[in-house]
Image: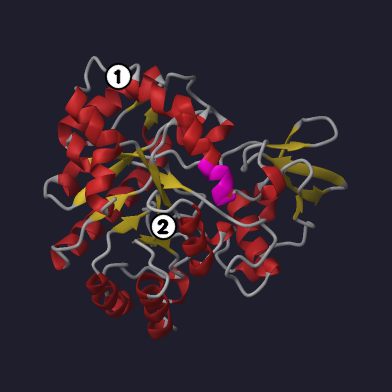
Amino acid sequence: MIIDSHVYCFTPIDTPGGHESGAVRMRFAQAGYSGHQQPAYRIKDLQPGPSDVLNPKASTDLMQLPDLQFRANYARGRMVWNYNGDEYTKQFFPPNLRNLEFTPFSLSSEMDYAGVNAALIHTDPMLGRDSAYLAECKKVMPGRLKSMIPVDEWRIKDDTDAVIQEVTDAVKVHGLDAIKFNPLGYASGPESWDDNWYRPFWEAVTKLNVPVFFTLGTGPDFRNRKRTKADEIQGYLNEHRILMKWMERYPNNVCSLTHGFPWRLFLDGNKIVLPADIWAPFKGENCNLEVCFPVRLGDLFDYPYREVWPTLEAMLKNIGADHLLWGTDMPFQNRFCTYRQSRQYIEKYCTNFIGKSEMAMIMGGTAKRILGF
């Protein structure tokens, strides 16, 4: 059984999608575009251009974003903004995305063609926060889709009870299957996200008995552009320490890290060099890791991504196939390879160090265990 542990379904980007309005959702999109690694370019001549101008102060306050007429161009499948009299864009979305939406019907067609049996839908503020919509997506492919639960991390401090209720309803009313928690993307302040004013939230939602998927950053100072690479690495390892405290407090809750590690942070030339401490959270039985390389490194390495094979082998050694789960970030991985190729770079080219039983766990067995497909 082939299970993709990381896909998306979302409505057109300037519709509300669970936010108060389409305009609010577009602010999240503008902030996301500002910091994303895909290159921006001037439309008239395809010359490189800036995207940090969309959020020049790297602010978490979405009301501080400048008005650059950030907007959707549905016909060309891209977001556009104005700067110094010219139009700019970047392909954060893959260029073949119709109407800047990715429906469960589109996902179904991609899965059928690539031979993917089941998948887990992820959530993101830019892509929508609507639990009812995600429940409807599941109905398109009965038994084949499960879905994350949107969590407004930035509201937990001041609106704790409401956020808890939203997550509870997502499980008990809408039948969603896992919690997606991004502790640094939109949360504010230096407080450790496993404790302090997060504690009541965790005490409540861990009782729902669904897995928690974390997207870890590089610490509360992650928007400080003066930080060195060493600072960022240390910040990420500090996040691992918080995760381990969380696992100690909630030993019966299964968790997983989305996207794998922040691979670009550990690049040394064309090699990924990982610190020894990075394996610490996986010494127990409850922490899992997504195997997801093309969407993060496909602009730097070509298919079949030979440069990442030693890292995948190290993941097998230090984590084990029964705690690794294949994911793609579909449809965003289509920027660099086809959906079939996102399977084949592992299944066809890594058989010299991945055995049949290990391959079965990575490509579906681990996700089946965690999510109960």
Q: In this view, does 67 lie to the left or right of 30?
A: right
Q: Is residue 281 above or below residue 195?
A: above
Residue displayed at 46% across by 51% down: 141
Mark 2 Cα-neighbour bin, 10 Å: few <14, some 14–19, many ≥20 = many
Residue displayed at 45% across by 65% down: 150
Q: Which of marks 1 and 2 is nearer the N terminus?
A: 2
Q: Confirm or deny contact between disc 1 and disc 2 (CB under 8 A).
A: no
Residue displayed at 68% across by 63% down: 15
Give the residue type that dot 1 points to. Answer: Cys
Q: Between marks 1 and 2, how big is the CA–CA gap?
A: 29 Å
* Picture mark count: 2
Residue displayed at 56% across by 62% down: 128
Q: Which mark is residue 188?
A: none
Q: Nearer the viewer, residue 281 or 17?
A: 17
Q: Is residue 188 visible?
A: no
Image location of residue 199, percent across then percent down: 27, 76
- Of all residues, the one furthest to the right in this rendering is 85
Image location of residue 147, percent across then percent down: 41, 57
Please give the residue where the numbered disc 2 appears in the rendered image. 147
Q: Is residue 46 left or right of residue 208?
A: right
Q: Can residue 111 be seen in this view?
A: yes
Q: Is residue 127 above or below residue 347?
A: below
Give the colouring mode of the picture.
Answer: secondary structure
Q: Is mark 2 on a helix, strand or loop?
A: strand
Image location of residue 8, percent across then percent down: 50, 50
Task: Give the position of the N terminus as an image quadrant.
Answer: top left
Q: Give the range drawn in magenta.
A: 103-108
User: What secondary structure prevails in the magenta region?
Assistant: helix
Image location of residue 135, percent across then percent down: 47, 63
Mark 1 Cα-neighbour bin, 10 Å: few <14, some 14–19, many ≥20 = some
Give the residue type that dot 2 points to. Answer: Ser
Please give the residue where the numbered disc 1 appears in the rendered image. 350
